[in-house]
Image (tube, grey):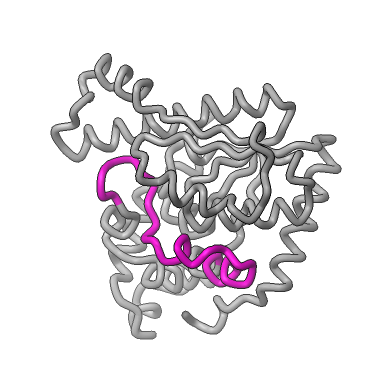
């Protein structure tokens, strides 16, 4: 990690909890819904929310297609003492399969079909998450980080949909640093990141590079406005691939296009 990407975890904890407090005060909401995948971003977000709100005002949702993620979800909420009635743990397998059957991708045959079904899954989760929020008069807390944002590594109107984003200013490697400071379970911090959209999916396999490789490149290119050549000359690898991936998805930050 380059020096500029080092964070002061205690400062970030205070900064983010203050942001959450101010957001709730500004909007007049007193309850928050969070989709907890069992990954480091949602586990970190839950920990931060619990420092601002009573746990009776926090609702956690885990909508899974593969039950392999349930163990990590339970690890994420284990020490937060969320009331049982505030937990929605439910499979969405039947819903996804029904939609997949209707669209002819119940059993994906290629990468495009896997991606289409994955997008369906993300958008179904969004529908259910926002319905849960409406039911409980709550805001939806997002879990997107700066790495995912720059890379466009999200589903439009799916996992990117939220009412506020407490981690949006932090790169993925910085989220890990904050997670360690907050005591997020090691099991969560050491499990390879995945959106859980198909079997054996990981972010690194799908991206073609790790967040450790991507973060300094994204920071230098987008935040510091360095050229590809300048970044390469600093000894970073996969520079062209990382920036190309980000630029290919850049349209996601602009839609909908208007006159």
Q: Residue furthest top?
A: 102
- In the displayed structure image, the side of residue 9 where residue 247 appears, left or right: left
Quarter of the image for residue 55 reads: top right
| Residue sitting nearer the eye, 31 or 120 | 31
Residue 123: percent from left, percent from top: 45, 30
Q: Is residue 221 magenta?
A: no
From this view, report whether residue 221 is shown above or below residue 124.
Answer: below
Q: How many marks do you count on the picture?
A: 0
Name the one closer to the observer, 165 or 56.
56
- Identified at 55% across, 65% down, the residue is 175
Rendering coords of residue 235 (x, y %): 34, 84
Q: In this view, does 84 lie to the left or right of 192?
A: right
Residue 58, compared with residue 103, is above or below; it is below
- Residue drawn at 26 percent across, 57 percent down: 205
Say left or right for 51 vs 211: right
Q: Residue at position x 78%, y 52% from top? A: 52
Q: Percent position (x, y) of residue 124?
A: 45, 27
68 to 121, vertically: above or below: below
Viewer-proximal residue among 31 and 12 = 31
Tell me where residue 164 sits by quadrant.
top right
Residue at figure coordinates x 42%, y 55% from the top left: 151
Residue 250 seen from this side: no
- Residue 129, position in %: x, y? 56, 30
Q: Quadrant of residue 27?
A: top right
Q: Is residue 193 in the magenta section?
A: yes
Quadrant the C terminus occupies: top right
Q: Is residue 231 visible?
A: yes
In the image, 74 versus 181, the foreground residue is: 74
Q: Give the range drawn in magenta.
A: 175-201
């Amino acid at each position: 990690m380059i020096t500029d990407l080092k964070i002061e975890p205690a400062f970030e904890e205070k900064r983010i909890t203050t942001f959450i407090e101010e957001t709730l005060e500004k909007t007049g909401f007193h309850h928050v819904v969070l989709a907890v995948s069992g990954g480091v971003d949602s586990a970190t977000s839950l920990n931060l929310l619990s420092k601002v709100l009573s746990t009776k005002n926090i609702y956690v949702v885990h909508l899974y297609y593969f039950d392999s993620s349930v163990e990590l979800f339970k690890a994420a909420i284990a020490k937060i003492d969320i009331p049982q009635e505030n937990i929605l743990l439910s499979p969405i397998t039947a819903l996804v399969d029904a939609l997949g059957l209707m669209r002819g991708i119940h059993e994906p045959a290629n990468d495009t079909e896997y991606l289409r079904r994955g997008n369906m899954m993300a958008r179904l989760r969004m529908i259910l998450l926002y319905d849960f929020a409406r039911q409980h008069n709550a805001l939806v807390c997002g879990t997107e980080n700066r790495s995912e944002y720059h890379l466009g590594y999200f589903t439009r109107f799916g996992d990117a949909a939220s009412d506020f984003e407490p981690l949006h200013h932090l790169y993925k490697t910085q989220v890990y640093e904050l997670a360690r400071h907050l005591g997020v379970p090691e099991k969560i911090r050491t499990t390879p990141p995945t959106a859980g959209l198909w079997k054996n999916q990981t972010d690194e396999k799908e991206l073609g590079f790790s967040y450790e490789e991507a973060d300094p490149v994204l920071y230098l290119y987008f935040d510091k406005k360095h050229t590809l050549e300048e970044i390469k000359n600093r000894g970073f690898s996969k520079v062209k691939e990382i920036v190309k991936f980000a630029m290919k998805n850049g349209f996601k930050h602009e839609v909908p296009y208007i006159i």
